Image (cartoon, rainbow, N blue to C red):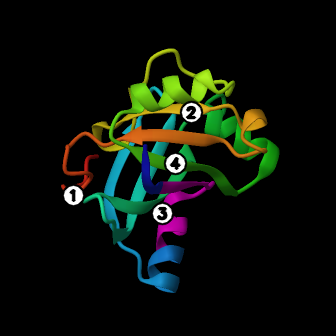
Amino acid sequence: MLTRIDHIGIACTDLDATVEFYRATYGFEVSHTEVNEEQGVREAMLRINGTDDGGASYLQLLEPTREDSAVGKWLAKNGEGVHHIAFGTADVDAEAAGIRDKGVRVLYDEPRRGSMDSRITFLHPKDCHGVLTELVTSAATSGRGAEHTDH
């Protein structure tokens, strides 16, 4: 069962400048940063609000660390903007299996590590009306309440 919009991923060319825009314009503050070498991105999570299931909704700003990363390739083709939408779920494995059974292509055979030690997988955008869709299970059972910064 999907429980919330976990985050909206936004690809950018300059993470620091984009963070400053969201801070100055909307008052959003960074709750977590990290470099994900496997995904080839430097990212900042900006917490928007808490949710009924104890988690939160975020904006995830993504700057590629390599041109050959998925976000780097997408950015070169499309420019800055919304890259994906992510839905939270208590069980990414079961949710992905159920969605796969409905004929939607799941991009990873097994979920991978995502932001803040979450478990993630993606659904093929061609099967989701042009939207790259991520499924996320937070590391903590209480959601992503523990906010910290990793460098």
Give the secondary structure at mark 2: strand
- Indicate which disc, 4 or 3, sits on the residue closer to the N terminus: 3
For label 3, the residue is 16
What is the spatial separation of the Cα atoms under label 2 and label 3, in whole angstroms? 26 Å
- Indicate which disc, 3 or 1, sits on the residue closer to the N terminus: 3
Locate residue 136, reporting x and y percent.
Answer: 42, 40
Give the secondary structure at mark 4: strand
Q: Is residue 134 left or right of residue 92?
A: right
| Label 1 Cα neighbours within 10 Å, binned few <14 / some 14-19 / many ≥20 | some
For label 2, the residue is 122
| Label 2 Cα neighbours within 10 Å, binned few <14 / some 14-19 / many ≥20 | many
What is the spatial separation of the Cα atoms under label 4 and label 3, in whole angstroms? 22 Å
Between 16 and 102, the residue placed more toward the observer is: 102
Give the secondary structure at mark 1: loop
Give the secondary structure at mark 3: helix
Q: Which residues are magenta?
A: 7-20
Between 47 and 123, the residue placed more toward the observer is: 123
Q: Amino acid at mark 4?
A: Ala
**Would you say the residues marked 1 and 2 are in contact, meaning their CB atoms lie under 8 Å apart?**
no
| Label 3 Cα neighbours within 10 Å, binned few <14 / some 14-19 / many ≥20 | few
Locate residue 68, reporting x and y percent.
Answer: 66, 28
Q: Is residue 141 left or right of residue 135?
A: left
Say the numbered circle drawn on residue 72. none
Locate residue 127, reporting x and y percent.
Answer: 74, 34
What is the spatial separation of the Cα atoms under label 3 and label 1, in whole angstroms? 24 Å
Corner quadrant of residue 55: bottom left
Q: Is residue 85 above or below residue 101?
A: below
- Tell us which disc is closer to us: 2 or 3: 2
For label 1, the residue is 145
| Label 4 Cα neighbours within 10 Å, binned few <14 / some 14-19 / many ≥20 | many
For label 4, the residue is 86
